[in-house]
Image (spheres, rainbow, N blue to C red):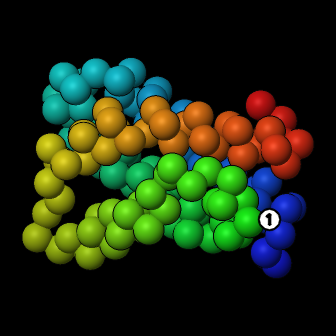
Amino acid sequence: MNPGPEADRVLLAHMRDCLDRIHEYTNAERARFDASRMVQDAVIRNLQTLAESSQRLSSDIKGTEPQIPWRDLAGFRNVIVHGYLGVDLGAVWLVVEQDLPALTLAVKRMANRLGAQG
């Protein structure tokens, strides 16, 4: 897919889906996350996919949300993907709890700027 508004719309929809799934799986409750390896695996996989999609967004659209630490998001993806000896579940939960609410709002605003639905 070529970079540009249409690609950004698709990527943002994909990111929103990942964010929605993470919320569905955890209901923003640490106990739910801690209680199930399946939920942990699902959250980690969706974070990985979310971060990968964010790396493919155009610089133009990312520039509309400069408060989002785009580089850190990409770096977190690398930690998840290359964490051969395990992933720090506490760090994963901190991302879910502290970073995803702002990212969710930013993704919605970016989608609205591009005229995407939702």
Query: Image point 58% across, 63% down: which residue?
Result: 53
Query: Image point 85% across, 62% down: which residue?
Result: 5
| Disc 1, SS | helix
Quarter-of-image position of residue 55: bottom right
- Quick one: quadrant of the C terminus? top right
Q: Identity of the amino acid at label 1? A: Ala
- Nearer to me, 80 or 54: 54
State the count of labels: 1
Circle 1 residue: 7
Query: Image point 61% across, 51% down: which residue?
Result: 65
Residue 44 at x, y percent in the picture: 34, 51
Residue 72 at x, y percent in the picture: 38, 63
Query: Image point 49% across, 62% down: which residue?
Result: 70
Quarter-of-image position of residue 56: bottom right
One can see residue 81 in this view: no
Whether 89 is drawn above or below 105: the answer is: below
| View extreme (left): residue | 85
Whether 49 is drawn above or below 29: the answer is: below
Q: Is residue 21 left or right of residue 87?
A: right
Residue 22 at x, y percent in the picture: 44, 37
- Quick one: quadrant of the N terminus? bottom right
One can see residue 37 in this view: yes
Label 1 Cα neighbours within 10 Å, binned few <14 / some 14-19 / many ≥20: some
Whether 86 is drawn above or below 47: the answer is: below
